[in-house]
DNA sequence: GATGAATGAGCCTTCATTCAT
DNA sequence: GATGAATGAAGGCTCATTCAT
């Protein structure tokens, strides 16, 4: 319960909330329609303010766009780093966990729209691309790399080329995002994300696990066999 | 007063060459700026003609874009279909061939920019999305599916879930494109495409080939081992 | 350097007055140049605003035109309907009243130019034609028909073919409009509208009134005799 | 049979025919679509020549338009003048003859489209309006006036105001043209031209014939009674 | 701070007109 | 004479941005 002496009049608290409300409205619309097709008037209306007010908080459309990206992507990285640092079991299960929880926290949510948005529009905003590279790609890649190194070090993975394999493992995630936000909505282009990820994991573990150790054997709950069909 | 001998005609008759010149200019600009951000006047100017001339050859922006896709992407799909229909050897080699020649004809060229553009903007241009779905995605998917069916039928692949595996195999191609056109241009984000593809192929073949048949054994020339580092 | 006290704002806030100002400018220009030849920029400029402002009040050219019709023609139709519904005297006088007040409210005003415009250009703008048919022609025709039915029912008119007679009665109004806006402006083509209408009415009533009842006898004030001249 | 020595090579005769072919194509399209909506390229194509060729014969669009009017309207006036000069019977029958043959020769044919066109677009072509006034309106009006004078002089018509009555008599013709080319094509706006004209004639003759002489009695074959219902 | 009326540059598309061949 | 490729000025409409209130 907040101290009543700190209470501010309604309009003033409102003032502080404005940028966040605008950011959320912008997030929704950018994800829904893309950058060029999003009209600032619609953003303002959805945030419950007038068009002019938007310009009190953001210099222009590009500035708003950058703010949306900055505010919505970075926080999603920490959990993966924590998992890798603290995980206890077999590295194959860690890999499965990373992929699955990435899907839960990012892929299946609105945040995925931001990632697609960045890949789509980063080319027109170099500054944004740099920011994204530093704060998202590099950190995410490092978590994946660490996981692979852990697996090799513990003898749970074969001694593969770690950098390349990292990117191989990132591929299906980017793929799912792209699919979901571009061709997915079209008829006849259905893709079951979890089945797709499990199929991929099964394939990948065939390549990662030492010869003789079947992919399915090493897996805990939730591993789908490619033999099913 | 300009020398009269230097006088140039207001324009030059080049009917036969025009469409190709316009197509190339359009490809450049679409890749560089995206669909919505490309102005037809700029396309015309880059092709050395006036705005009106463009409309002598293409009905409208959409028509021009379709022509770009037909000229730069569709032929590669046709080649893949032919390969699948006529290939003679082991299905693993057919898979490698499809992936590698796709990279040569599309991924490594400017045409890849069109694919990225479609994934980025298709949502805002439904008619383009439908066109692309029909002419590129469906045909490409079908070729990949046929290749897998061939492998299973000939006993060269395990009896996997073909639809899911098709999408798994498409993933790295989409991934490379996305990488190349969004984060790729940034420093420290280098990705060696061929090595990436070979790594992926090796992993995938581990999952596809019947147990006991090592991925590397079945491959012809060009197969990279995941052990290489 | 201009006197700072003379400085005018880039624009003036006149939200309430704008629609009417735009409507008047549009009426002038539509009448003067026709529908297709009227440029919205000119309408805006004549109303003292910029092109974009026009679109704050009217969705597009067609919408603007409809508003002009609604503001200048439709009310006259409504008045005729009211007259027919509430009129008390002899039906011949109702007919005279309809014709005369139509002339006062439409024929003699700028609004007549809109009617001419519709007859001239409706063929090229089907949506406008439909709108006009519904809002003006059908309602106007119905009012005239009702008036005739009233006359016949009360024994004031002979039992004529009502649909044909309705069109006969519409003819001179259309005629006057056509005359006024095409050949009328030319020298030596003068036509005194009221005299023309009275002549027509006299002729028409000869055909409408029961035999034995002279046209002039049945008329109240304002009836002109064809014998005069 | 033409003298064989006069025979010209095909292309040269073709050359002479070109203007007429273009005129006919232009007539069709102007009537069908109106002035502004008719594209010169379509006119040229319908005449079987190229766009450039059209400009060899007509300076520009307006020039072509004038030529169409000159070639298609003026000839239709002479017949009426001749009828008035040579008619032998009752003036009421002459009136009926003028109206009916006007309908046959003009109203029911493509030429009516030209009249509508002129009334619709004359305002934008003052020079054309003058020409039309002199060659069509004045001559047509004079014929009608002469007919009325004849009727009055012979005691077949009452001593009406001839100028006004002339215009009353022109009204239904203009009305039919306007109807046919603007609202007529719309559903629910059917108008039977001949019935309309006969209804009008019956009404008019009620006003024209001396008291005591019923309209139908004086009429020859083809007079419709307004009593029919 | 907040508003929203007003602006005007910009884009796609059309078509009368020109002119090298 | 004939052609038709090429031009470029419009015109309808949109929307990011400004600014008087």
Image (cartoon, coloured by chain):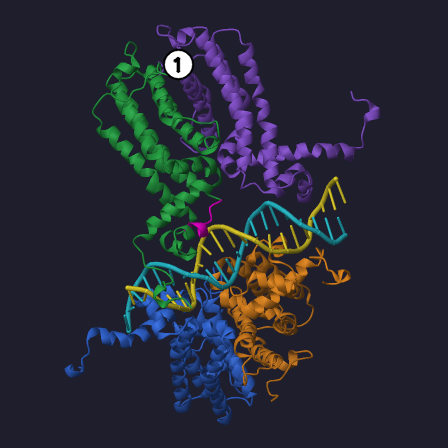
Chain colours: A blue, B orange, C green, D purple, E cyan, F yellow
Determine whether B121 is above or below D55 in the image. Answer: below
Q: Is residue D76 left or right of residue E8?
A: right
In this view, the residue in front, A138 or D67, is D67
Spot the residue most to the bottom.
A153
Residue C168 lies left or right of residue B217; in this view the side is left
Residue B162 in the image: state x and y as whole percent: 53, 68
Q: Is residue C39 magenta?
A: yes
For the question of whether residue C150 can be seen, the reply is: no
Chain hosting mark 1? D
Image coordinates for residue C8, horizontal then vertical, percent = 36, 62
Helix, strand or loop at mark 1: loop
Q: Along the horizontal axis of the image, is B165 left or right of C47?
A: right
Q: Is residue D191 magenta?
A: no
**Residue at point 60%, 88% (across, down):** B227
In which quadrant will I find the C terminus of chain B? bottom right
Q: Which residues are magenta?
A: C37-43
Please state the horizontal and vertical placement of residue B97, each as a whole percent of the image: 65, 72
| Residue occupied by mark 1 | D160
Q: Quadrant of the N terminus of chain B?
A: bottom right
User: In the image, A68: left or right of B41?
Assistant: left
* Res C114 visible: yes
**Where residue C103 appears, x then y in whole percent?**
34, 30
């Amino acid at each position: 319960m907040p101290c009543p002496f700190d209470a501010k009049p309604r309009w003033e608290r409102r003032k502080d909330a404005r940028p966040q409300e605008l950011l959320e409205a912008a997030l929704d619309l950018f994800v829904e329609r893309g950058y060029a097709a999003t009209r600032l008037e619609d953003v303002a209306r959805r945030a419950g303010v007038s068009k002019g007010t938007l310009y009190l908080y953001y210099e222009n459309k590009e500035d708003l766009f950058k703010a949306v990206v900055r505010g919505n992507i970075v926080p999603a990285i920490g959990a993966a780093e924590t998992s890798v640092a603290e995980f206890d079991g077999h590295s194959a299960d860690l890999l499965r966990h990373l992929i699955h929880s990435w899907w839960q926290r990012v892929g299946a949510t609105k945040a995925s729209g931001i990632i697609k948005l960045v890949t789509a529009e980063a080319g027109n905003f170099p500054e944004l691309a740099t920011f994204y590279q530093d704060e998202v790609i590099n950190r995410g890649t490092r978590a994946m790399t660490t996981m692979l190194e852990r697996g090799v070090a513990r003898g749970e993975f074969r001694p593969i080329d770690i950098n390349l394999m990292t990117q191989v493992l990132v591929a299906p995630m980017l793929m799912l995002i792209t699919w979901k936000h571009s061709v997915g909505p079209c008829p006849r282009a259905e893709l079951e994300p979890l089945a797709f990820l499990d199929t991929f994991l099964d394939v990948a573990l065939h390549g990662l696990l030492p010869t003789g150790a079947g992919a399915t054997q090493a897996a805990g709950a939730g591993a789908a066999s490619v033999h099913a069909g």
